[in-house]
Amino acid sequence: MPAEFLRVAVDDPLAEPLLRELTHEYVTRYGPEGRQEMDRYPGEAFAEPHGVLLLLLEDGEPVAGGAYKRYDEHTAELKRVWTHSAHRRRGLARRVLAELERTAAEAGYTGLYLTTGPRQPEARGLYLAAGYTPLFDVCADPRTVTLLPFEKRLSAGQPQPPVPAPTS
């Protein structure tokens, strides 16, 4: 079965591995603040029409995912971009990011905003490689920065094309 995207609610059982592993990673990297971040927003924040939670499924199992919620009238805020630890280094996060961009543009958003933390260098690299504009000093000592905000403009009415699946 080919990989496919599925829109789900936060309480959908298919989202549980994403949320469980992401919570574990946040707590491992940031301590108790990691759990607070995962509990910060109600599930409805990621529900349509203003938000979405996407899972990338392979053979019916979630291997990656991500979400956005409304930040303001024109901007969606990306949250919870994740790749299952057994499936990393395959370009799946980039596929999720592209699908979130496409979906947000279809929903009428013209921009994206996100923050990541200084203890997530792989996320920082992903957003820089995907054309996001850093709203922080990229040369600053990571120990002196608490949040790494990024933004990206979307073409209104012109959704981003999906990223093709990697060939094995």
Image (cartoon, rainbow, N blue to C red):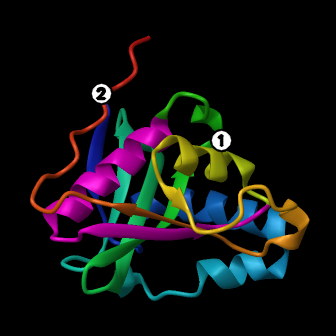
**Residue type for callout 2:** Pro
Residue 83 appears in the figure: no
Residue 84 appears in the figure: yes
Image x and y of residue 35, in percent = 71, 79
Q: Quadrant of the N terminus?
A: top left
| 63 lies above or below 80 | above
**Residue type for callout 1:** Ser
Question: Over which residues does the magenta segment extend?
Answer: 92-118
Q: Quadrant of the C terminus?
A: top left
Give whichever of discs 2 and 1 has the lower sequence position: 1
What mark, if any, has residue 36 been given in the picture?
A: none
Residue depicted at 50% across the width and 87% down the height: 41
| 53 lies above or below 85 | below
Location of mark 1 (residue): 85
Image x and y of residue 120, in percent = 73, 56
Most foreground residue, 79 or 53: 79
Location of mark 2 (residue): 164
- Identify the residue at the far top of this view: 168
